[in-house]
Image (spheres, rainbow, N blue to C red):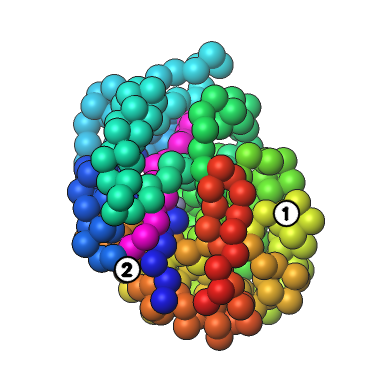
């Protein structure tokens, strides 16, 4: 039985209202033994901030309050609270609940080629246990906030190929991550009749992606939020998971990607079944950036 959850957000992420202590209490009440908080670390373009404001309905001015312009004047740091304050709050709570649950500190970096330097510098400064690298964007646009720009008039093959191609480049360029997050995340937003990503449609790209990950000693995650989004499966789907196994992939973590307390630890029994059905004998936990394999 899986009792760990390695992907969740608190209100330090711009898309979550969750209090860190409420997240921890929920995990304890479910009998989880270990969780890893993985708030977003994104350095998007200023345009993305404005688009996010339109999408979320929040006033641009309040979003810009969180955004601190970096040196080049084009990128913004999207962290709602000062990071040192964030870490001391995390340490206080991890120690308060020590007897009930292990609470680790991770983060989910938004892998974009234009902000590699800023992300590497941020990761180097803090003692993260675990880092998820996620491709929430491509062509310099956040996918969720720029659907019209990215999908309009383009075929699924064209758009998903562009997304996967940039993902491969980022996996080659980035070292500061442990697992690649929700690989087929783009299917949440694709406006296609069948928006699923099938391994046979993107065979060469997925093979290259997985071989590169394996060569670099990195893994992937099984992100159960796909069920929450009504996709009927986790990210990535079983077809893609099998492809990863065929490429020699063994490192895989499990996370709910909860943005609210009641989503913590969701679909863990389903995750165990999916992994067994895709040829995995074990899943991974990370601490101090090192994996431990746990038999399913
Ligand atoms: Zn994500
Ligand atoms: Zn996430």
The residue most toward the bottom is: 277
Residue range (magenta):
32-45
Instruction: Report helix, strand or loop for mark 1.
Output: loop
Image position, residue 215 (x, y; %) = 79, 56
Foreground: 205 or 145? Answer: 205
- Residue 243 on the magenta segment: no
Identify the residue at image location x=33%, y=63%. 32
Foreground: 128 or 233? Answer: 128
Identify the residue at image location x=61%, y=55%. 291
Foreground: 209 or 128? Answer: 128
State whether residue 208 appears in this view. Answer: no
Kindly report the distance in space between the C-alpha atoms of the residues bearing marks 1 and 2. 28 Å
Q: Answer few, some or many: residues within 10 Å of disc 1's Cα (few below 14, many 20 plus, some between 14 and 19).
A: some
Identify the residue at image location x=39%, y=26%. 83
Q: Which residue is mark 2?
A: 266
| Disc sitting over residue 217 in the figure | 1
Q: Earlier in the sequence, mark 1 or mark 2?
A: 1
Tell me if residue 241 comes above or below residue 62 in the rendering.
below
Image position, residue 52 (x, y; %) = 34, 40
Image position, residue 142 (x, y; %) = 47, 45
- Residue 37 on the magenta segment: yes
Instruction: Report helix, strand or loop for mark 2.
Output: loop
The residue most toward the front is: 99
């Amino acid at each position: 039985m899986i009792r760990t959850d390695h992907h969740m957000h608190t209100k330090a992420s711009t898309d979550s209202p969750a209090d860190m202590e409420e997240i921890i209490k929920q995990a304890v009440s479910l009998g989880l033994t270990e969780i890893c908080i993985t708030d977003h670390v994104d350095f998007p373009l200023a345009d993305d901030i404005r688009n996010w404001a339109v999408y979320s309905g929040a006033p641009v001015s309040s979003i810009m309050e969180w955004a601190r312009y970096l040196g080049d004047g084009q990128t913004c740091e999207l962290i709602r609270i000062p990071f040192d304050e964030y870490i001391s709050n995390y340490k206080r709570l991890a120690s308060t609940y020590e007897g009930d649950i292990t609470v680790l500190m991770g983060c989910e970096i938004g892998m974009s080629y234009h902000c590699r330097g800023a992300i590497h510098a941020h990761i180097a400064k803090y003692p993260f246990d675990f880092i998820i690298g996620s491709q929430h964007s491509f062509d310099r646009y956040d996918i969720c906030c720029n659907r019209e720009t990215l999908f309009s008039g383009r075929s699924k093959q064209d758009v998903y190929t562009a997304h996967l191609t940039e993902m491969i480049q980022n996996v080659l360029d980035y070292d500061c991550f442990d697992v690649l997050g929700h690989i087929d995340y783009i299917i949440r937003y694709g406006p296609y009749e069948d928006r699923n990503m099938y391994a046979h449609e993107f065979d060469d790209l997925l093979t290259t992606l997985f071989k590169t990950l394996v060569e670099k000693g990195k893994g992937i995650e099984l992100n159960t939020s796909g069920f929450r989004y009504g996709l009927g499966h986790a990210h990535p789907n079983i077809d893609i998971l099998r492809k990863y196994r065929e490429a020699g992939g063994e490192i895989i973590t499990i996370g709910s990607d909860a943005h609210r307390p009641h989503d913590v630890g969701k679909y863990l029994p389903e995750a165990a079944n999916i992994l067994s059905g895709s040829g995995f004998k074990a899943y991974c936990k990370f601490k101090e950036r090192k994996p431990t394999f746990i038999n399913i």
